[in-house]
Image: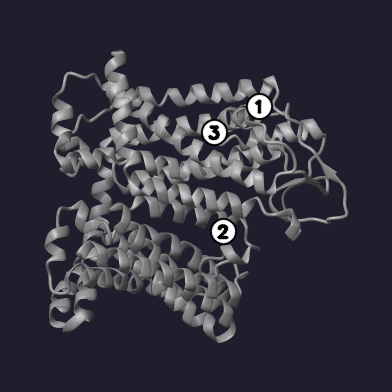
Amino acid sequence: MNAPALRVIALNEVRLRLRRLSTLVALLAAMGLCWLAIADPADGITMMVIDQKRVLYTSQALAFGSAHIAGMLLGLAGFYLVRGRVADDLQSGMGAVIGATGASNALLACGRWLGGVAYLMLFVLAYLGSTLALHALRGEGPIELLVYLQTYVLMLLPIISYAAACAVLFDNIGALVGKRGDVLFFFLWCMQFGALVGVTESPGALWPMFLDFSGLSVAVTTLREHFETTYFALGRHAFDPSGPTMVIPASLWNLKAWGIRAATLSLSFLLLAPAALFFHRYSPDRVRPRSARGSRLLALAHRMLRPVAIAVRPLPGLAMRVPGFAGEVLAEVALVLSMSPSAALLLAAGTVAAAVVAPVLLPGVMTIGVAGWGLIVCGIAPRDWQNGADAMTGALPGGVLRRYLRQWSASLVLALPLLMAALRWSFDAPARAAAALAGVLALASAASLLGGLTRGARLFLALFLFTWYIALNAPKEAALDLVGFNGSANLGTAAAWALAGCLAWAAGFAHNRWRRA
């Protein structure tokens, strides 16, 4: 391995990613989530409770809680922040240059992995600075920097290495370069939490902890063994201010925890072997395999969706006959559905299901529907730039502002199944219907804003899927009930989401107006 070349590749990866606006947006989101989860005890809400006792905000407690939040977010968002370099290289023309160099596959894979790890470590250092500021404001004890560093290294280094290695692996396999790779990793991320279930149901089991890159199972086991308890709550939790308190010692982590996390970190390195072995080196027939030599399963899927593609064909002609802005929006919808017959199938099936299923099944339709809709609309705003048509579509009548408005409106039209469910809820659950409408508005505006700012779909996709997953696992949190699928939303949270949607829409409009100038 050429050490100087490895260093150059890694530093180049760090520089390129630090220049992306998505880095700043993701960092602000992580900081906001940390400050929201680590509530002020003066408000009667605390971050952690053990045996009905509030845990004091010492350095170890805040390091534990903030690392837990960062680990969950970086385990998903870190992958989406690191990957995508193949698309950049193909668009800039550097892919052919890189593929023709004498650098080995192993050097390129390891360099990009090392750059991704260094980039995410810088992200964590900035996040740590925010946590230290929070400690200065709400902490109950001195700031012990070494305690923070130990906890962050133990909990975050394996998940950072894993996210970066998966990003490199998925970018190096042509079939996983696109959105199917993004969706696959989300399911892999969700499966990690099965290790926590395995440890909870089998307290003596060790092997699930080795496969848990998030570190939750190790953290839970360590707390359980140290305090000899099975009851603890991590997150926003009400407590009795007059009740007893508890302190997490600075020496919480034992050799067993360090050994397990070191082994887990080592497992992440193994992903670099297939990344180097299957690296496509930007060969056109391997980066996007669409030829007849493609997999039989993919060909079968195309044949099954052919009737859907045929049904969508009249839409462009209809859009040409519809005058004004409505025709432009219909043309955007037709383009999305023509490019993805599976989206057309999901739209049709979701609309029918939302209209005819029994009321008790409507939340399930809404849950699945909003996930599919988010996967569809995340690529609308950055599509023109990614395909080299940004300047052309921006030169049409109305310019970039009109393009922003029609793409945002197309996102709302594609939410027809969700709007149908909201219509049915409006008769017997108006608060739930209001939450559905506000959530659709907020998500469509966020997709347009983040897609335009970052010129990519992955930042919105990461934040959206993370919020969707957390909402499913916190059904009683009204603020997280995105579109009313949990039934816990109220008029107050609906108004808050509607306001957030309006602000995101205004920010997107202002950004496009600035681009026009």
Instruction: Report which quarter residue 305 is drawn in.
Output: bottom left
List the residue tagged with mark 2.
Answer: 471
On residue 287, the disc is none
Question: As shown in the figure, which amino acid type bears the numbered disc 1?
Answer: Leu
Q: What is the CA distance from the residue labelled 3 to the residue labelled 2?
A: 23 Å
Residues packed near mark 1 inside 10 Å, few (<14), some (14 to 19) or many (20 plus): some
Q: Percent from the top left, x then y, of residue 9?
A: 28, 25
Q: Percent from the top left, x then y, of residue 254?
A: 70, 23
Question: As shown in the figure, which amino acid type bears the numbered disc 2?
Answer: Ala
Report the mark closest to the observer, 3 or 2. Answer: 3
Q: What is the CA distance from the residue labelled 3 to the residue labelled 1?
A: 19 Å
Tag 1 near tag 2, CB within 8 Å: no
Q: What is the CA distance from the residue labelled 1 to the residue labelled 2?
A: 29 Å
Question: Of label 3 and label 1, which has the lower sequence position?
Answer: 3
List the residue tagged with mark 3.
Answer: 156
The vertical placement of 417 against 265, above or below, is below
Instruction: Report which quarter residue 350 is drawn in.
Output: bottom left
Q: Percent from the top left, x then y, of residue 290?
A: 18, 44
Q: Residue at x 42, y 42 (%)?
A: 185
Question: Of label 3 and label 2, which has the lower sequence position?
Answer: 3
Question: Of label 1 and label 2, which has the lower sequence position?
Answer: 1
Instruction: Report which quarter residue 335 is drawn in.
Output: bottom left
Residues packed near mark 3 inside 10 Å, few (<14), some (14 to 19) or many (20 plus): many
Q: Percent from the top left, x then y, of residue 483?
A: 51, 69
The reply to whether residue 460 is in sight is yes
SS state under label 2: helix
List the residue tagged with mark 1.
Answer: 206
Location of the C terminus by quadrant is bottom left
The vertical placement of 321 against 136, above or below, is below
112 to the left or right of 388: right
Colouring convention used in this rendered image of the protein: one colour
